[in-house]
Amino acid sequence: MNENQLDTFIANEYQKRADAYNNADWYRAQVSTREIGVWRRAGQLPTEWTNGSLAETALKVRRGFKSNSKHIRGRAKRALPRIIKFADSISKEKYLFPIVFAGGTGTRGRKRFRIKMKGDIDDGCMRSIALALTGRKTLDVYFGIPTK
């Protein structure tokens, strides 16, 4: 897709996201799993599991899988084991890098959390959690800083 087609595709589903993406400067970056956080209730995980850093979320998910927790359900239960199988490929493929906004900006998928992070994952929460579950301490991402 060219840029106009991509904009239209995203806007048809989620105009707020399209606007946020177009009103940011974008950089390829490497970030620590301790400096970024996932969306509130990403993959139907409990809010208290997603309110800290990606590293903290992954630790809670790891413990949940070990104890066969009923809190791991829905998308997280289905997607994470499948994504983990392809973690090496996913971590290297530039088209699959997570999209991260500077903390508290963008589409604000972490609003109402008291814990503020340097970056908020906007797209790729399940991929990011899976990569953190495989032991990665840093992730390659596209990092957006709003221009306004």
Image (tube, helix red, strand yellow):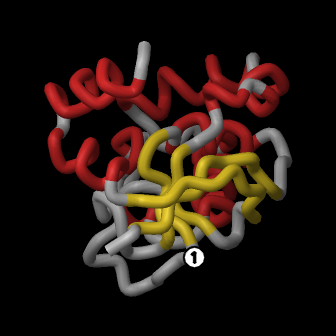
Foreground of the two, 1 or 44: 1
Q: State the quadrant of the N terminus.
A: top left
Q: Report the front residue among 54 and 24.
A: 24
Q: Is residue 57 left or right of residue 5?
A: right
* Residue 115 screen position, x and y as percent: 46, 83
Q: How many residues crowd mark 1 within 10 Å: few (<14), some (14–19), many (20+)?
A: some
Q: Say whether residue 119 is left or right of residue 1.
A: right
Residue underneath mark 1: 118
| Residue depicted at x 62% and y 43% | 128
Visible residue check, residue 109: no
Near-viewer residue (97 or 61): 97
* Residue 7 relative to residue 88: left or right: left
| Quarter of the figure with residue 92 | top right
Q: How many marks?
A: 1
- In percent of width and height, residue 121 lies at 49, 54
**Which residue is at 72% across, 56% downward?**
29
Classify the position of the C terminus by image quarter. Answer: bottom left
Residue at the spot x=63%, y=55% of the render? 27
Amino acid type, label 1 = Lys
Q: Where residue 123 sits: x, y (%)? A: 45, 42
Compared to residue 23, the image places residue 117 above or below, namely below
